[in-house]
Image (tube, grey):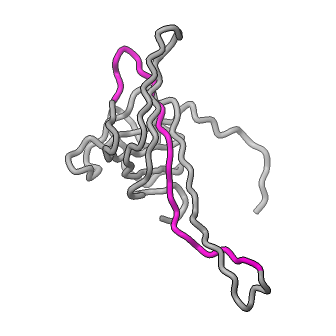
Amino acid sequence: MTFSAGDLCCSQFMCVLLDTSVGLDGSAWDKIPHVTQMAFTETANTPKLVTSDSAGRELSLCGTVGTTGNLSIACHNGDYPEFCINQEIRVRWSISCDAIWSGGAAVSGPWAVDVYEAKVRITSKPVDMNASQAGATLLNYSWEVTQWIMQGSCAI
């Protein structure tokens, strides 16, 4: 595959949707206002094994994958969702908001860009209300994936 320089993938048009349906079944969505960042890291637990064929070298095995991430929301005039520790939420996000949200409603697939959707459990909730700082208060939630629904172009 040949790669060539092109336009940067800028995330200014990225957005995050929150499943507001009872039971988190994906039937009702709302756009989270003022999302500033959505990031996640996948880490494989790769146990090592030495066999008679490895000449004493350790070989990595496929292991379970854990996914953790952060959702940062800027609070503007009190308009933001607040999540609780250990709360499970279902979120959908994409680098192109137009792909998943249009006319005040969620857009169903297929999508032309990578779309991510998962049920996540809130694992940390630092609240920093800094009155000396000019600007919006940021709510930075950490989470772990409990179930991937869609994972971009990667297989689940």
Q: Residue at x 25, y 48 (%)?
A: 27
Q: Nearer the viewer, residue 131 or 69?
A: 131
Q: Quadrant of the N terminus?
A: bottom right
Give the number of marks. Answer: 0
Does residue 13 show up magenta in the picture?
Answer: no
Residue 60 is left or right of residue 79, and the answer is: right
Q: Residue at x 69, y 87 (%)?
A: 51
Does residue 78 show up magenta in the picture?
Answer: yes
Query: How far across and down, in percent of the image, does residue 22 sit?
Result: 20, 46
Query: How far across and down, in percent of the image, does residue 104 sit?
Result: 33, 32
Q: Quadrant of residue 34?
A: top left
Relative to 112, say whether 128 is above or below.
above
Residue 67 is left or right of residue 60, and the answer is: left
What range of the chain is rendered magenta? 57-81
Residue 24 is left or right of residue 109, and the answer is: left
Q: Nearer the viewer, residue 117 or 87?
A: 87
Query: How far across and down, in percent of the image, does residue 108 sit?
Result: 37, 49
Relative to 123, say whether 151 is above or below.
below
Q: Residue at x 74, y 42 (%)?
A: 6
Q: Residue at x 71, y 39 (%)?
A: 7
